[in-house]
Structure formats: C-alpha cells, structure tokens
Amino acid sequence: MEFELENPFDENYHDLPFEAVTSLFHIESDHIPPSTYFHTLKATNFDISLRRHLISFISQLSCTFDPVLPYLATNYLDRYLASQAILQQKPWSKKLLAISCFSLAAKMLKIEYSLTDVQALVNNHGDGGVIFEAQTIQRMEAIVLGTLQWRMRSITPFSFIPFFINMFGINDPAFNQVLKDRASQIILKSQTEIKVLEFKPSVIAASALLSASHELFPFQYPCFFRAISDSSYVNKESMMQCYNVMQEIGREEYESSVLNVNSSSDRDTPVNVLDEHFLSMEESEKTNNIAPPTTSTTHNKDLIKRRSSKFTAYANNNNNHSFHSHHQC
C-alpha cells in the first residue's frame, strides 16, 4: 500500500499495514544530510552564520505558507550544501540557491507563489541591483535537482506528528490542533540550530511534541512522555538529547525576549512598570544599607525566573481545569 512521504499519517493511516509504518521509520535517514555535514558546520563559524542567514531568508519567503514549506526548503538546502559545501561566490548566488530551494519545495507541495513578491524581498535585503528571472531560477533548480539526484520526496518531522499525537489518546480535535501548532513552531525554530541536524525526523517530531506538551499541559506531560517512550520506533536516549536541545533553545529565546523588553523604549507596559517599581525598591534598599544583587545581570535573571514561575503557575492552574476532564492516564 502506497502513502505520501510528506503526509503519510493522514486520517486514514490506521489502514496502513504494519510493514508500511515500519518501513517509513527505516528510510527516514535517507532524507537528511550525512553526519559529516554537521561536523563540518560545527568546525566553521562562517558556515553556521551563513546557513542561519539563508534559513532566515527562506523563512521570510515562506511566512504566509504552511510550515512544512520552509522546513522542506531548508532540507534541500542542507542536503545540497552537504554535497557542494558553502558557496563562496557573490552574495546574490547564495540568495539564488535559497530561492531555488524554496521554489522546489513549493512545487513539491503544489503551492503557488509570486515571483514578484520574491523579488521584492530580495530588494529589501539590499540586493536591489539583482533581478532573478524565472529562467535563472529554473537553471539553479536543475542544479539542485541533479545534486540531490532528484530525491525530493523528503520525510520531515511533520510527517510523524499525527502518529505521535495519536499515542496521547486525546479525542478533542481542538487540543490536538493546539499541540500540533506549537510543536510545528518548535520544529521550525530548532531548525536553525545545527545540533538538531544530528537527529532523525521522527526523533525531532517526538521531542517537539514533548516540549509543546510540557509547555502547554504540564500536568499531562508525564503521561505523554510515557506514551512516546514506550514506542518501539523511538530511541529514548536520542529523544531526550533532542528534547534537551529544544528546551535550551526555548530558554534562550525566552530570556532574549524578556531582556529585549527591558531594554525597549516602551516603558509603559504593566510588566515594565513593575520592573521600575522593583528597581526603585532596590535603590531604597541601597540607601538603607541593605545589600542589593551584585550585578544588573543577576537582577535580570532573577526577574526572568519570577516571571517564568508566575506564568507557569497560572498556566498550570488553567490547564488543570480545562484539560483534565478530556484526558487521563
């Protein structure tokens, strides 16, 4: 029985024979860059920086489309660079490669896009003197296709999300969609981190769903964790390594966003007003010879922890009331 590699676990995937499901997990490694690519990137900061820049550009091209599109385009980009190495030519050639990968992914997913919008984005990136005509993009597409040996039906983490969500035993479509959407965001965010290149798509999907469930439904997380860990298709050790990487990415993103809020010019938000109140209290403590935190960095980290704990407590309280009646271990 045949199935789509990009979306193998649709609503009828229960009809798939056991051999078909097993084969999908066995061939997923055929659709990712070799391990040597990760080590090459890790050894060269320039390559890492350029890769992130190209992924950011692809994300901007894909911002109005399904998240599978930018992920698939980046998969093509990584597999191409693993064979051809990072381009050292003019900047526009790198943009042309990113556009071609985006275009190929759109064609594979049968998504239409506007070449005019692509050109406008190129102009906004400071390449206004370069015009990418359709024939130029098509020639670059042919080069990418040849390098990838026309193996474009890639298996991505999105292919496995429905399979793992089904293990949670949630019968509410709304909750399933919330988990899927948050996991998709985590998958896209993590794609820029080269450490994630070490893991298979199924491991990335399982780890992203666990991260999403830990964030959204912390009381149900142990149950979800057991459900996935008991699966014979998942290497538990690899999954936890990937999960820890995603947690680290999430913490860095959260801390960065909080610190950016602190340094922004908008000082009238409720949170910032409270920050100023705490700062004034600390100044008062200094006047009264009460020892303040040793550095401003310490204060910021403590502030992050306070906000995080309050938010978690609020979320836990709401999740306990709104979700518990729908699912129990």
Image (spheres, grey):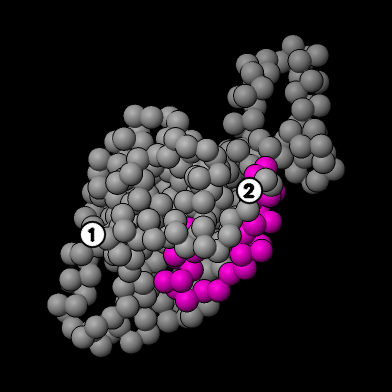
Q: Which residue is mark 1?
A: 30
Extreme residue toward the top, this view:
289
Q: Secondary structure at mark 2?
A: loop
Boundaries of the magenta span: 100-127
Q: Is residue 199 left or right of residue 55?
A: left
Q: Give the camera-side residue of 83 and 162.
A: 83
Q: Which residue is mark 2?
A: 130
Return the x and y of residue 152 as percentages of the image width and height: 33, 65
- Camera-side mark, 1 or 2: 2
Bin the neighbour count of mark 2 within 10 Å (Cα to Cα): few under 14, some 14-19, many 20 and up: few
Q: Is residue 94 left or right of residue 15?
A: right
Dividing the image into 4 quarters, which one contains the N terminus? Answer: bottom left
Bin the neighbour count of mark 1 within 10 Å (Cα to Cα): few under 14, some 14-19, many 20 and up: few
User: Which label sits on residue 158?
Assistant: none
- Look at the image and tell me whether residue 102 can be seen: no
Spatial separation of the CA atoms under disc 1 and disc 2: 36 Å
Question: Going 48% across and 80% down the picture, which residue do you hit?
Answer: 173
